[in-house]
Image: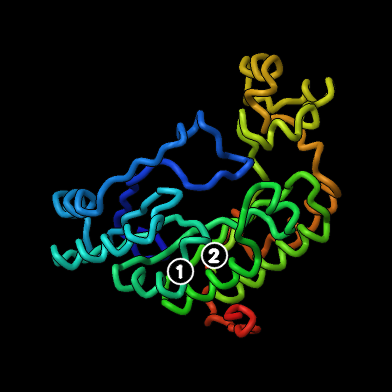
Amino acid sequence: EDDPLGYDFMVHLLTSRGCPGACSFCAHRSVWGGRRSTLSMEALCEFLLEHDYQGGRTLVVLHDDTFLFPPGRLRALERELGRRKLSVRWASFARIADIGRDTTPVLRDTGCDQVTFGVDGLSKDILAGMRKATGLAEAKRAVAALLDAGVAVRVNLIWDWPGETYEEFEALVHFAYESVCLGALAGLSRLQVYPRTRLLAQIGSGMVMDEAALRALPPALGEAAFFVRENPALYPNFFRHAHSRDTDKKIALFEKMGFIFGGDRTRQTRHPVRWTGREAYRD
């Protein structure tokens, strides 16, 4: 009832599994098995129609990491919505690589209210190490393209990459601030390291706490703390990110800038969009 975006009902769906990427921090054959499986847009629209999830004050949230991949899926959705005369308000996750000037008009015309994508670092060295081909310039273009089309944007930014300098983190925070000023949502979160990934193998023993820190594991873990201590490779995110440089300085800046994200580090601006430096986002 108090939803600021005006929805009475939200439906959360997955229409695909698997990702074409090979990023060092999450990609592993044990996750997707090297395969991708998708639900057809015909089947999705049939489901929405059958359950009357359409139009009005209902939002369909598509939690696929790559709902817009490949581009033909979005065109197929457009065709099916038109054929069935369906009116749907929806939101989705996407990769920066799947957002372009030719994509955003279709998003708007098919009823897309919001797109969420991640920015995993700004340093070329860090991006190369994680096998990412998209960086700051591409992220700026994606923000501009979506906002120009009237589609809300949420940018999730990740910090604390191995080797990340304070200056690189500062640039990430500045990009988050710029995005909020332009009218986007923005969130900052610390890197999560997944078991069996290349990144965890690279970090190695740098993730392991000393004995004092182990004893200080969160009390909420209770008896599970013993199992976590005995199996550090399975629970890397309970352990110190010892690879982070200037961590204290970064956290201080994060807290200082926290007001732009609101209480939970995210918020949507209510003032008119300020297109300061808009030309840079069109280069």
The residue sitting at 39% across, 41% down in the picture is 36
The residue sitting at 43% across, 52% down in the picture is 66
Query: Relative to 10, is 173 on the left or the right?
Result: right
**Above or below for 277 versus 137:** below
Horizontal and vertical percent position of residue 32: 46, 35
**Above or below for 277 versus 53:** below
Q: Which mark is residue 152?
A: 1
Query: Relative to 15, is 282 on the left or the right?
Result: right
Q: Which residue is mark 2?
A: 185
The residue sitting at 84% across, 24% down in the picture is 210
Horizontal and vertical percent position of residue 39: 28, 46
Q: Secondary structure at mark 2?
A: strand
Q: Quadrant of the N terminus?
A: bottom left
Query: Relative to 99, is 51 on the left or the right?
Result: left
For badge 1, the amino acid type reads Ala
Q: Quadrant of residue 155?
A: bottom right
* Image marks 1 and 2: residues in contact by CB distance under 8 Å: yes
Q: Nearer the viewer, residue 123 or 59?
A: 123
